[in-house]
Amino acid sequence: MLNSNDVFNNLRSDLESAEQERLKRLEKIKPYKKFFLFCVAIGIAGLLYSLLVEEVIAIGIYPAIIVLGLIIFGVKSAWETRKFKEYFQNNIAVKIIEFLGPDFSYEPQGKLPESLVKGSGFFRSFNRFDAEDLVKGKIGDRKVEYGEIKLVKETTKSGQSSSSSRKTIFEGIFLILELNASFPAPVWILPGNRISPYHDIDRKSGEEVSVQHEPFNKKHFAFSYHTQFARKLLTPTILDRLMDLDNGMFNQKITDGPISYLFRENQIMLAIPLKGKFMEPKLEEAINTKEFIEKQLFMLNSIHMVVEKLN
């Protein structure tokens, strides 16, 4: 586990430089914020005047002025936020990951393969895949790889009443831990109480695995193509460990829901729905403080606690 005091003291000068970069980005946004507030003032004043003199044609102009100001301000804010995120990832996040040890590397724009995520069977109905923040390393003699992913389902209806919708299926960390041993058959542990169209699993080739564990059964269910092996794998000790992990991360407001697990071949895969973003600072929040480092390490240490629990 990383110690916040050690990381903060070692990165103090880098954090001060990053804080100056953050303040510089905020200064670049200020004129656009003033412009937006000016547009709001003009829009409201013009709208009230038009209502008083009953100029119907002019009424639609003033809301458009407000919207224009908002768009310009929003675009500039998004641009500066993105540039600061890139600075942070390349100058601070990389160095934080280095504290995990020489076997670890961090690629801000690195992506887990989409085929790997699809092959897990955790998710079916998504047609847009975004990934970043790829971390690779070794804990003991076991390889671990994880990164942030976002799965979205976009639908478009054509015809007289054409419309489009966008739904986030999953957002969080996808983790793969390699083992020295191999599982003879895949075993899934999934949120809920049954296989649904949400999952990409062949229901006809396997069945749900009943276990005598009330806390587990309240939040998860198990499914496998080899139920006899699954029952041997899912001992009370293993289920206790998984529930401690799941409940601990949820109670500490790291996760946004139950974790999904897959034991397959020589790997354990996890889909961890995060409540916040991984390795992503806020432009409005100072980063040259110990509190900021503690917040970053809290999530990072929690992810590595997952690996230790599963070892």
Image: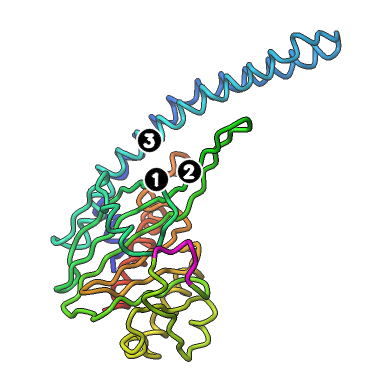
In this rendering, which labeled residue sits more in front, label 3 or label 2? 2
Q: Earlier in the sequence, mark 3 or mark 1?
A: 3
Which quarter shows the C terminus?
bottom left
Measuring 54% from the left and 41% from the top, which residue is drawn there?
165
Disc 2 to disc 1, C-alpha distance: 7 Å
Q: Quadrant of the N terminus?
A: bottom left
SS for dot 1: strand
Query: Is 181 placed left or right of 20 in the picture?
Result: left
Question: Residue 21 placed where, x, y %?
Answer: 34, 34
Q: Which residue is the site of mark 2?
A: 154
Left or right: residue 69 compared with residue 56: left
The label on residue 128 is 1
Q: Secondary structure at mark 3?
A: helix
How packed mark 3 is, by other alpha carbons closer than 10 Å (few <14, some 14-19, many 20 or more), is some
In-front residue for pair 97/177: 177
Residue 112 is one of the magenta-drawn residues: no
The residue nearer to you, when weighing 251 against 239, is 239
Residue span colored magenta: 195-200
Q: Check whether the beta carbons of the residues at disc 2 and disc 1 lie within 8 A of each other.
A: yes
Please state which amino acid type lies under the numbered disc 1. Answer: Arg
Is residue 16 something one can see in this rendering?
yes
Callout 2 crowding tier (Cα within 10 Å): few <14, some 14–19, many ≥20: some
Q: Are marks 3 and 2 in contact (CB under 8 Å)?
A: no
Report the amino acid beneath label 3: Arg
Mark identifier at residue 90: none
- Which amino acid type is marked by label 2? Glu
Residue count near mark 1 (Cα–Cα under 10 Å), binned few <14, some 14–19, many ≥20: some
The residue drawn where x is 64% and y is 17% is: 64
Gap between marks 3 and 2 measured at Cα: 24 Å
Residue 105 sits above or below residue 1 on the image: above
Residue topped by disc 3: 82
